């Protein structure tokens, strides 16, 4: 059972990675002068939208945490609304943290906010898909030994990897190399993207290597 | 020998300070070779001997009768040649574009501080970096220099302006009036003191050289920056002075006498923030204007300016006055000055210059004959001789002129190469001393690292193996070997070496120290290898469950150390610390969440009654509980338990959860108070907004609020006497700032009289000393009578309050919020974060160190010499007194780290009841965390000593780090003294 789960996870992750690669290549066919560095904001929008839609589609197809009871349409609608609100709040929170880290408060607000949206897509949206708008479940997953399935483990790994990637992405900014990718927020968003991709790759492998040690309690 | 960790760490730091001192002494050699002076009628070379003997063996006649040097401090090139010059200096612009003048951009070398620049201008040599340190305490210049040559030649020199000159050249001026440069807020009086002499002096005929040094522009720059509205009027004033001098000189000039020369120059530029000291283009480029009726009249606006070196002025003036060139000068003659002369004279001057440079090269470089500059010079000299032969034969054709031009070119090329190879000579390192220092520092750090497990054990005591017999044999062998090396190095050394020049006894002492440290390290390593299992059995160490916070601390330390390799990261080191502190706050936030949402929940579930649990226990329990307890059940319980929790606890919980965010916000505000570094230093910040003269009211309100807040925050834990003293002292601080004109009293709107505020400042000093005295009295009482630890805590808090008051006095008023936020963060972090989370002493020490470093930059410091606030050294002093000034400047620079260190001591000694070894652990960790970056940086700088930015970026940081080690050693001694007291009590 576990092996099939891991296979499904791997497939989902490969699909995600593939979608990210597509966002770097495909838009240049439709848009003139498209490049990740030159028109970074466009790329940020496209990448966030693409990753978000892929995640939602995967969630609908795979249903990693199937809920036992059936819910009515109204409940589903409130859940969806709650998810949207959570997502928006997380964007604002990320924006605030980035500003606290030293991003300019007034100038380049759009860049900062889009970067926050990208980070939220990589982290919060993923969590919302997997766990739903349930803070208790989030706290459980992100505390030690709180994972209940390999999906929770992969969630932990990808989230931490994207945030660490964004964190490391800030390092080259003070260097005086005057490269185009040192402009705010390119290095950070690229770092987050690489971190996310790395997380997507690492998660199935790590789970595979540690499949003996990982024992999950049933609900 | 058994030692406690605190004592051990202090000893290590003292030894390390010795090593760092030795390294610094080797790295910043005092001026390597200063050739002795030589008489005015010294050995002048004759013209290169042509086959027939030449008749020109005498000193060439002077070109100018009188020279007036107008040196305007911090005159940047665009103030004269840029749009500002066109707007505010119309007369000068007219002279540059249409007058009889030559204009250049003179490039100053790295420490762009006044005294080294004056030395460079007058001796033509590049003063060593160490001159920056001596800048405050300028002793007389003993090298051969222009002023001395002029005086020896009987020229009468008059000087008005910065009294650095008077100290550098005592008894050289027939008449002088020095003004002090240290009251930076005064920018009218200093210049009026110079200008008031001008009218009488210009009428007189009894002088040959007049030097005027105007300080006002520099003061305006320091105070408000280069774009302030004050700069324009000041430039205009300077323009009028130039006009006055120039017209007076022109009116005096007769038909028959020699023309006069007016030199207008700056000693250094001004960065975009208004300071100087670094090596950005704005600081390095200064204008150099030579005006004389001997020159050709310019026609039309200037196209591109020629770049010359600042050192070129000395030789040009020496030639212009017919004086011998200073022996240490590495400058090149500025050719346009002698363009009007005949070809023979021009070649003669260039030959003199080249001869002097090649002599300097001969005395400095053993293999001078292989130097390409020297070879070029020899070739040029030879063709010069041939040219003279042709000339003396009476050949006056076109061929001769062309040949002369060729010789001229050869000379210029030779001069260029000679001076570049000579300026490379200046950067000669004393590798041997550096090596000895590095070895000591590395050994100390290694020893500290090896003793971590023992020093941080609960006893905080450990054995230092001093006398195993095997060590002793090795020890003597090593001593012998090192002595042999010492003899070999010192007898074969060509260049000056500090370590060779110290007495044999102390050299032997250092050798023994090195070998003893080596033996101790070896035996400690041996012990670790033979009993590798011993530390593993220790329950505290076996807990391999690392927190995210520990990972962050280790990764942050390693990351910071490795970031020192890159010059940009050194320039922007504040970014590293802000980044780390922010991440630390987020990690603390996560810890808080975990503490309140998970651990507590499981605690309640287990209903454990233990209140004071050690950190590891809590963690282990949480771990254990999470494993065994069914977590969804716990989740369900949370909802039920939360409402029943006590209200008080609840509020504490929420404040605790919010406090990391408050700290983050404070840090963000402080970051925008002072923009430092290099890349983003020009960004607008609150500090500049507040200090600009339009916002004095806001600044006053802010200062008043800050002082009130400081009082509220400090008085909580002080004794009653100190409370009153504190309140009066803070009032004194405000009246001091009002007296020197930084802030305004609401009831005296337009008082123009600005005093030095000496009485007010001394009033505050009395209270500072009083508070510190009360604190020391309490500390001594607790030491002697050995009462409970509360007396000691009170004493420590009093000392801390005294330091805060001193900082409040010395900080610029716009920096007072830094102090307020520092106190607020400290109060918050102790009450709401460290109390509930139960960190151990090591973690708390490292976090304190990080915050201390961040505050070092929050208060506006950077890794460039330019940001040192010298004016703090003159608070409450009539004139420059060396020791208090150095102490005060050092204190105000390192206020951030110092206040955090003292706060750490206060906190740890209040926690003694919980962990008796806390102070010892803290001291050890503080020593370790400070010495690791220093050791790494010393090795790095040795490797990068030929890097392009070594003098502009790496050396200032090295100085800052060196001073930091000395201060840390002091702090650790203080720690140990406090710990001593405690341990004695335990023994009782």
Image: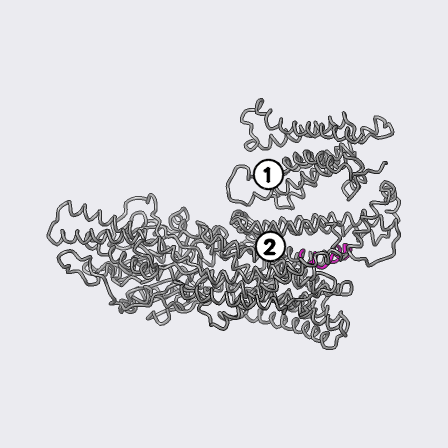
Secondary structure at badge 1 equals loop
Q: Is residue B783 visible?
A: yes
- Which of the chains bears the disc numbered 2? B
Q: Are marks 2 and 1 on the same chain?
A: no
Q: Classify residue B126 as left or right of residue B884.
A: left
Q: Quadrant location of residue B468?
A: bottom right
**Can you say which quadrant of the picture contains the C terminus of chain B?**
bottom right
Quarter of the image with the N terminus of chain B is: bottom right
Q: Label 2 to label 1, Cα distance in Å? A: 24 Å
Numbered disc 2: secondary structure: helix
On the image, the x and y values in percent for residue B982 come to 73, 70
User: Badge 2 local density, few (<14 within 10 Å), some, or many (20+)?
Assistant: many
Height in image: B939 above or below A163? below
Colouring rule applied to residues: one colour
For the question of whether residue A111 can be seen, the reply is no
| Residue topped by disc 1 | A185
* Rendering coords of residue A197 (x, y %): 65, 34
Identify which residue, B524 or B803, lies in the foreground.
B524
For label 2, the residue is B858
């Amino acid at each position: 059972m576990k092996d099939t789960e891991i296979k499904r996870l791997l497939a989902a992750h490969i699909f995600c990675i593939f979608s990210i690669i597509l966002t770097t290549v495909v838009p240049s066919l439709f848009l003139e002068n498209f490049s990740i560095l030159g028109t970074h904001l466009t790329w940020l929008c496209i990448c966030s939208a693409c990753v978000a839609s892929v995640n939602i589609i995967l969630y609908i197809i795979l249903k990693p945490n199937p809920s036992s009871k059936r819910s009515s349409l109204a409940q589903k609608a409130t859940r969806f609304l709650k998810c949207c609100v959570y997502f928006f709040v997380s964007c604002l929170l990320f924006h605030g943290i980035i500003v606290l880290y030293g991003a300019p408060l007034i100038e380049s607000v759009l860049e900062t906010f889009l970067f926050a949206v990208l980070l939220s897509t990589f982290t919060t949206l993923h969590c919302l898909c997997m766990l739903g708008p349930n803070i208790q479940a989030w706290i459980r997953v992100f505390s030690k030994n709180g994972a209940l399935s390999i999906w929770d483990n992969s969630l932990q790994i990808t989230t931490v990897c994207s945030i660490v990637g964004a964190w490391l992405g800030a390092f080259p900014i003070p260097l005086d190399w005057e490269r185009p990718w040192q402009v705010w927020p390119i290095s950070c968003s690229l770092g987050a993207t690489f971190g996310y991709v790395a997380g997507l790759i690492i998660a199935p492998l790590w789970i595979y290597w540690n499949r003996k040690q990982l024992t999950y309690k049933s609900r | 020998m058994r030692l406690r960790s605190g004592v051990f760490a202090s000893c290590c730091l003292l030894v390390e300070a010795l090593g760092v001192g030795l390294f610094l002494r080797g790295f910043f050699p005092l001026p390597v070779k200063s050739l002795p002076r030589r008489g005015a009628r010294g050995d002048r070379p004759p013209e290169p001997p042509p086959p027939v003997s030449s008749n020109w063996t005498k000193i060439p006649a002077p070109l100018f009768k009188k020279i007036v040097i107008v040196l305007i401090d911090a005159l940047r090139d665009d103030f004269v040649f840029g749009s500002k010059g066109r707007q505010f200096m119309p007369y000068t612009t007219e002279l540059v574009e249409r007058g009889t003048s030559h204009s250049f951009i003179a490039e100053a070398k790295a420490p762009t501080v006044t005294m080294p620049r004056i030395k460079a201008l007058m001796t033509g040599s590049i003063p060593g970096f160490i001159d920056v340190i001596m800048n405050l305490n300028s002793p007389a210049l003993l090298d051969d220099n222009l002023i001395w040559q002029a005086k020896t030649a009987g020229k009468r020199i008059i000087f008005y302006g910065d009294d650095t000159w008077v100290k550098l050249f005592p008894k050289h001026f027939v008449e002088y009036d020095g003004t002090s440069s240290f009251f930076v807020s005064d920018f009218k009086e200093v210049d009026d003191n110079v200008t008031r002499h001008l009218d009488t002096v210009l009428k007189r005929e009894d002088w040959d050289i007049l030097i005027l040094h105007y300080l006002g522009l520099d003061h305006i720059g320091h105070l408000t920056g280069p774009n302030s509205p004050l700069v324009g009027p000041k430039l205009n004033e300077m323009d009028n002075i130039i006009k006055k001098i120039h017209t007076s000189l022109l009116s005096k000039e007769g038909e028959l006498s020699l023309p006069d020369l007016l030199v207008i120059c700056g000693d250094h530029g001004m960065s975009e923030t208004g300071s100087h000291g670094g090596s950005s283009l704005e600081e390095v480029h200064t204008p150099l204007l030579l005006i004389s009726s001997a020159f050709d009249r310019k026609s039309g606006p200037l196209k591109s300016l020629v770049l010359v070196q600042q050192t070129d002025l000395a030789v040009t003036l020496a030639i212009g006055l017919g004086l011998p060139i200073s022996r240490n000068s590495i400058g090149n003659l500025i050719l346009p000055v002698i363009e009007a002369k005949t070809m023979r004279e021009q070649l003669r001057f260039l030959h003199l210059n080249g001869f002097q440079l090649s002599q300097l090269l001969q005395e400095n470089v053993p293999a001078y004959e292989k130097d390409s500059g020297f070879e070029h010079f020899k070739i040029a000299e030879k063709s010069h001789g041939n040219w003279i032969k042709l000339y003396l034969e009476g050949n006056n054709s076109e061929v001769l002129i062309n040949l002369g031009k060729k010789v001229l070119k050869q000379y210029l090329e030779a001069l260029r190469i000679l001076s570049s190879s000579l300026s490379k000579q200046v950067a000669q390192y004393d590798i041997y001393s550096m090596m000895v220092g590095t070895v000591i520092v590395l050994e100390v750090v290694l020893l500290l690292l090896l003793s971590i497990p023992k020093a941080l054990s609960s006893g905080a005591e450990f054995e230092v193996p001093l006398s195993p017999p095997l060590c002793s044999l090795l020890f003597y062998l090593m001593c012998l070997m090192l002595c042999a090396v010492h003899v070999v190095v010192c007898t074969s050394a060509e260049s000056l070496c500090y370590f060779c020049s110290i007495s044999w006894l102390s050299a032997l002492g250092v050798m023994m120290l090195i070998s003893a440290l080596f033996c101790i390290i070896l035996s400690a390593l041996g012990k670790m290898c033979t009993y590798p299992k011993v530390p593993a059995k220790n329950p505290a160490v076996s807990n391999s469950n690392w927190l995210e916070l520990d990972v962050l601390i280790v990764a942050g330390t390693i990351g910071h150390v490795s970031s020192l390799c890159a010059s940009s990261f050194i320039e922007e080191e504040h970014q590293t610390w802000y980044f780390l502190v922010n991440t630390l706050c987020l990690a603390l936030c996560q810890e808080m969440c975990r503490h309140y949402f998970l651990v507590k929940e499981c605690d309640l579930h287990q209903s454990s009654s233990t209140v004071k649990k050690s950190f590891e226990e809590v963690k282990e329990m949480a771990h254990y509980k999470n494993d065994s307890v069914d977590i969804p059940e716990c989740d369900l319980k949370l909802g039920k338990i939360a409402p029943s929790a006590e209200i008080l606890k609840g509020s504490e919980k929420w404040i605790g959860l919010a406090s990391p965010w408050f700290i983050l916000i404070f840090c963000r505000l402080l970051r925008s108070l002072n923009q430092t570094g290099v890349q983003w230093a020009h960004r607008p910040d609150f500090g500049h907004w507040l200090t600009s003269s339009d916002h004095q009211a806001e600044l006053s309100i802010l200062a008043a609020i800050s002082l009130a807040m400081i009082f509220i925050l400090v008085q909580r834990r002080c004794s009653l006497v100190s409370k009153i003293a504190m309140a009066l002292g803070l009032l004194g601080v405000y009246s001091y700032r009002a007296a020197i004109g930084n802030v305004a009293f609401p009831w005296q709107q337009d008082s123009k009289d600005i005093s030095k505020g000496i009485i007010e400042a001394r009033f505050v000093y009395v209270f500072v000393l009083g508070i510190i005295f009360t604190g020391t009295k309490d500390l001594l009482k607790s030491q002697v009578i050995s009462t409970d630890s509360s007396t000691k805590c009170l004493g420590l808090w009093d000392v801390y309050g005294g330091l805060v008051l001193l900082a409040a006095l010395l900080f610029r008023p716009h920096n007072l919020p830094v102090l307020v936020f520092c106190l607020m963060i400290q109060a918050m972090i102790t009450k709401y974060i460290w109390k509930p989370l139960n960190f151990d002493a090591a973690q708390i020490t490292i976090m304190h160190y990080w915050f201390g470093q961040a505050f070092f930059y929050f208060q506006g410091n950077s890794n460039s010499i330019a940001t040192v606030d010298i004016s703090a050294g003159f608070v409450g002093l009539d004139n420059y007194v060396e020791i208090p000034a150095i102490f005060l400047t050092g204190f105000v620079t390192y206020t951030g780290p110092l206040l955090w260190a003292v706060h750490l001591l206060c906190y740890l000694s209040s926690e003694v009841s919980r962990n008796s070894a806390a102070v010892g652990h803290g001291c050890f960790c503080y020593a370790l965390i400070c010495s690791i970056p220093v050791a790494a940086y010393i090795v790095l700088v040795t490797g990068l000593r030929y890097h392009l930015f070594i003098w502009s970026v790496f050396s200032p940081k090295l100085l800052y780090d060196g001073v930091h080690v000395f201060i840390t050693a002091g702090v650790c001694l203080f720690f140990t003294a406090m710990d001593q007291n405690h341990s004695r009590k335990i023994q009782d």
